[in-house]
Image (tube, rainbow, N blue to C red):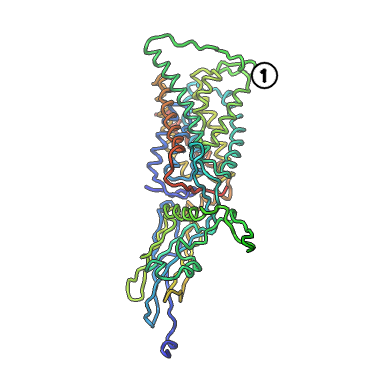
Amino acid sequence: MDFYLPIAEVSVNAPLLIALGAAVGFISGLFGIGGGFLMTPVLVFLGIPPAVAVASEANHVAASSTSSVISYTRRKAVDFRMGGVLAAGGAVGSLLGVEVFRWLRLLGQADLVVSLSYLVFLGVIGALMLWESLGSILRRRRGDAPKPRKDRRPPWLYGLPFKMRFPRSRLYISVIPPILLGVFVGILSAIMGVGGGFVLVPAMVYILRMPAGVVVGTSLFQIIITTSLTSVLQAGRNQTVDVVLATLLLIGGVLGAQVGARASSRFRAEELRALLAIIVLAVGLRMGLGLFFTPSEPFVLMTGNG
Amino acid sequence: MVAALDMPPAAVSAALTTTNVRVTSSFRGARIVLYGAVLDPSQKPSDVVVIVRGPDAPVRMARKTRIAGIWVNSRPVVFEGAPGFYMAASTRPLDEIASFSTLRRLGAGVDHLRINAPMEQRTETRYGVRDVVVSGLGADYLDWRRAVVRLKEESGLYAADARGVSFVDKGLFKAEIDLPTGAPIGVYSADIFLFQDGQPVSSRTRGLTVEKAGVERALYLFAHRRPWSYGLASVAIALAAGWAASVAFRRN
């Protein structure tokens, strides 16, 4: 059953998109990431113009994140205050990111920066996560005591001004690191068309030192706010949100996210992280390595005029 | 000679089976048939050429170059004069029907489209001749131009069929126009030329409109006329769907 998309102006196979939405929604609910880093490249591969793919994907991520964040809220696994601070930074970052992206498109270098960002960020984060999680899985198998968390309170995190209490995360830290983290993730999400969960989750664990139990839910909560904002901005400024495409994706997405959020409690945290690391690494390499191969067609058509 | 003066001149007439293509949610391209007749009492050998042009759409294109082992895009070049859809169909290969200059004048055939990059052009005085147009793309200019046509052909938007016009009966001919799913929205024109002895002796122009219809049209207009409300509405759908799924699963 094919559907003609009114904004993307291409015809797509509806059951395929619903199935893709469900698969990515499942991963989203399982790992507490938006899943945009998986879906955006797939949509572009299916022939949807990149600008429309990025904008409509933000809508799909907002839907599946809402679906799973409600289940996390029931388990009291969301730090709304921390999520709000991150989202405030994220809002600033996505406004900046949209401008940076426009400028890159004018220069014709948007493709390059997107591919390099995927290679560098997904590659590095995937490799680090894989290393760390494999380490803890091996230690547990050998029956060693878990590695003591060294430097439980990094001094730079506590030496900064504007301290705030985050009771759910049992933290009393300056708001500057979370805001900067939010800005960085916001810029990244506008450029790469992703929610930014793959950066946020490890950053919350390793930099902010939040308890593992609230990381996933809080990340999803902040993703809902930034992707909703991105979606409205993209629709308002560029008219690139395809509501038919987004709806097809989110039908599967919201259901997949529910199943994923339930399944997440059956796995050990480090096993989940190892699995996510492999997915992240694979997508990063797939997107980035294309830069090194000789293209079969030396010319590329660019969509849009700006 | 007297007889030739009495005879009416050769003429062509043609009609499209569809003049209005409606793009709805089930749109997967369209095939339009063009029928026409050659009215020529002198029975001279005739050739028919059909040129279909869609609305003009500037093409932005870049070339990949290798810098430090990485393939990067060059500065984008904007080509103007490229139609969003172009089809040339004829009874014989175009270069057998008419001379290069005639084809160039009519813009018949993908090689004769007036595609140029005005932003790259500048005028110089060369060998004492003033206002010579020089392209900043230099000797590669033809490569770029060919790439525009090649990429458009790959997406089904440009086509040249040297046997696309066929005579189904004496004086009655037929041509098929295949619009791909990605065909641009707008007003198209189909020019039908009758060639005799290498010259166009008669021509007809027929219009064709491709427009969005039904829900597709309503959504497209909503997205462009009230972009902010459209954005808020699409986010509301997303959040509501997420909430609904969560509630539905809790009850189960």
The image quarter in which residue A231 lies: top right
Residue B251 shows in this picture: no
The image quarter in which residue B179 lies: bottom left
Residue reaching furthest to the front: B127
- Residue B214 is situated, as x and y percent measured from the top left of the image, at 47, 54
> What crowding class fits label 1: few (fewer than 14 Cα within 10 Å), some (14-19), or many (20 or more)?
few
- B213 displayed left or right of B90: right
Residue nearest the viewer, comparing B81 with A242: B81
Q: Residue at x 42, y 76 (%)?
A: B197
- Residue B239 is situated, as x and y percent measured from the top left of the image, at 51, 35
Residue nearest the viewer, comparing A26 with B178: B178
Residue reaching furthest to the right: A161
Q: Chain of mark 1?
A: A
Q: Which residue is mark 1?
A: A161
Residue reaching furthest to the bottom: B2
Q: How many marks?
A: 1
Secondary structure beneath disc 1?
Answer: loop
Q: Residue at x 47, y 48 (%)?
A: A299
Residue nearest the viewer, comparing A259 with B133: B133
Residue A152 to residue B150: above or below? above
Residue A222 to residue A43: above or below? above
Residue A156 to residue B235: above or below? above
The image quarter in which residue A138 lies: top left
Residue nearest the viewer, comparing B24 with B45: B45
Residue B234 shows in this picture: yes
Give amino acid for label 1. Pro
- Residue A300 is situated, as x and y percent measured from the top left of the image, at 48, 47
Q: Residue at x 50, y 35 (%)?
A: A116
Residue B24 to residue B36: above or below? above
- Residue B234 is situated, as x and y percent measured from the top left of the image, at 52, 41
